[in-house]
Image (spheres, helix red, strand yellow):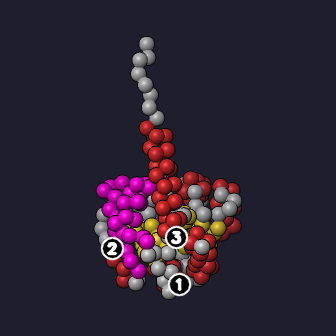
Amino acid sequence: MDGFKVIEIKRSVFENNNKEADRVRAMLKEQKTFLLNLMSSPGSGKTTTLKATVARLKDEFKIGVMEADIDGDTDARAMEQSGVKAIQLHTGGMCHLDAGMTEQGLTEFGTEDLDLVVLENVGNLVCPAEFDTGSSKNAMILSVPEGDDKPLKYPLMFSVCDAVLINKIDAKGIFDFDDDAVVERIHRLNPNCEIFFISAKTGEGVDAWCDWLRAQVEQWNG
């Protein structure tokens, strides 16, 4: 006789998080603050890309950056030196941020006077894709050395992103990377995803990415 209940914990966690994320999004919309959730694997060039982005937009928008890591404060220090407001979020060993953690960071940070906040999520292609942070848009960085097959291996990450930045294109002469293949694989998962080929190191392609982000911020805050 089966006298026990089966509780779907994961489903419950996601449902509760999604409700919290919608509430965070509504709060940010009311404040006219755009939140970009930036994801990638470790070493893809998130911080370098973010510094290049900030350099182009900081005279137009009041920008803040929330750096999420398991430990350390290297990235927050780097962003503060770039001339924007920065805060470090320690996840206590967790490999992602959820909406509740994001809201806690936003509350401590203070967003009322900011047009654009970037959440640099924990370096991971799995867990961050599963949790809605309450962001206005999601973006991710795929670096050339990681290979053009990543959409096949981590489909959810590419499915939830509004924009994908293919970084380190200056290294394509060293690595076997197929531009057409990666675009086809991403669009098969996510037809509306915007794709930008950039080199955060040389600046190639960064202006086009910033044009897209600028338009998103203006539309959200308009």
What label sits on residue 32 in the rendered view? 3
**Residue 117 visible in the shown view:** yes
Eyeballing the image, is 100 above or below 53? above
Amino acid carrying mark 2 in the image: Thr
Q: Quadrant of residue 7?
A: top left
Q: Position of residue 109 (x, y in %)?
A: 36, 69
What's the residue at 44%, 17% (across, down)? 2
Q: Nearer the viewer, mark 1 or mark 3?
A: 3
What's the residue at 53%, 65% (across, down)? 29
Count of numbered circles on the image: 3
The secondary element bearing badge 3 is classed as loop
Query: Could you classify mark 1 by the number of other residues whose Cα lies within 10 Å: few (under 14), some (14-19), or many (20 or more)?
Result: few
Q: Position of residue 93 (x, y in %)?
A: 32, 55
Considering the image in quadrants, where does the N terminus appear?
A: top left
Say whether marks 2 and 1 touch (CB < 8 Å).
Answer: no
Amino acid carrying mark 1 in the image: Glu
Q: Position of residue 210 (x, y in %)?
A: 58, 78
Q: Is residue 173 left or right of residue 31?
A: right
Amino acid carrying mark 3 in the image: Lys
The secondary element bearing badge 1 is classed as loop
What's the residue at 54%, 75% (across, down)? 168
Query: Could you classify mark 3 by the number of other residues whose Cα lies within 10 Å: few (under 14), some (14-19), or many (20 or more)?
Result: many
Considering the image in quadrants, where does the C terminus appear?
A: bottom right
Residue beneath disc 2: 74
Eyeballing the image, is 163 above or below 203? above
Residue beneath disc 1: 60
Front position in the image: 169 or 215 = 215
Q: CA distance from mark 1 to mark 3?
A: 15 Å
Q: Nearer the viewer, mark 2 or mark 3?
A: 3
User: Which contiguous range is marked in magenta?
Assistant: 84-112
**Residue 38 visible in the shown view:** no
